[in-house]
Image: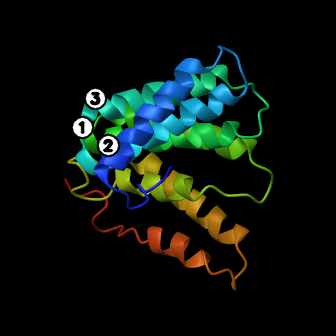
Amino acid sequence: MTDGGGGSPSDLDEAIKLHAATLALCPPGHIPQLEYINNLATSLCDRFQQHGTLSELEDVIELHRATLIFCPPHHALRSNYMNNLAVSLCDRFRQQGALPNLDEATEFYRAALALRPPGHSLIHVSTTLPAAFQPNSWNVPPHLTWAREAIKLHLAAVALHPPDNPRRFVFFYHLDINPETMFEQ
């Protein structure tokens, strides 16, 4: 996923049109189709991040699901596609507060991580779960199992990074969970 790259909204609209046109010209089952679907989903996600239009997020999720349908099980980028879907499901959770979105996102994060080589980590796996039980997060009640899962994933992510790794602090930062406020209603 990208952050929009700082371009103008008209540039993003043009990119979306071009991605959609490219996808329309691609024969079904053609290997680059995965990349074209993912590129369109990523651009739509960027526009969603700018405007917050839920219908665009639904389109993004549908495109990410399509990518996984067409992606062979052992494709080198399958874990990336799973991660992208999980990120979008978390975005929908943030918009709607529906716990099944977070449950499904967690399943896709786990599946994506399982496809990664040993020692590889996906930062989203260990940084998204804490949001589910932070007080005042989308007015969702806390869940002890998610708390334990998030802490376990954070600690595993820290263990994968040597003490001198500059990214190690990110996992410690997101592990900052206050046990006294976790279960306040």
Report the disc number at residue 55: 3
Q: Can residue 142 be seen?
A: no
Q: Can residue 155 be seen?
A: yes
Report the disc number at residue 176: none
- Whichever of labels 2 and 3 marks the residue nearer the N terminus, that label is 2
Observer-nearest residue: 18 or 185? Answer: 18
- Amino acid on which disc 2 is placed: Phe
| Residue 158 spot, x, y in % from top left | 63, 70
Give the Cα separation between the discs numbered 3 and 1: 6 Å
The residue sitting at 54% across, 70% down in the picture is 171
Residue found farthest to the bottom: 164
The residue sitting at 67% across, 58% down in the picture is 121
Give the Cα separation between the discs numbered 1 and 2: 6 Å
- Amino acid on which disc 3 is placed: Ser
Vertical comparison of 98 with 148: above or below: above
Verify CB contact (< 8 Å) between mark 3 and mark 1.
Answer: yes
Q: Secondary structure at mark 2?
A: helix
- Amino acid on which disc 1 is placed: Thr
Tell me the crowding category of disc 1: few under 14, some 14 to 19, or many 20 or more residues within 10 angstroms, Cα based. few
- Whichever of labels 1 and 2 marks the residue nearer the N terminus, that label is 2
Verify CB contact (< 8 Å) between mark 1 and mark 2.
Answer: yes
Looking at the image, how many numbered discs can be counted on the residues?
Answer: 3
146 with respect to 158 (left or right) = left
Residue found farthest to the top: 28
Report the disc number at residue 48: 2
Q: Secondary structure at mark 1?
A: loop
| Residue 152 spot, x, y in % from top left | 58, 58
Q: Quadrant of residue 99?
A: top left
Observer-nearest residue: 165 or 176? Answer: 165
The residue sitting at 43% across, 30% down in the picture is 61
| Residue at the spot of label 1 | 53
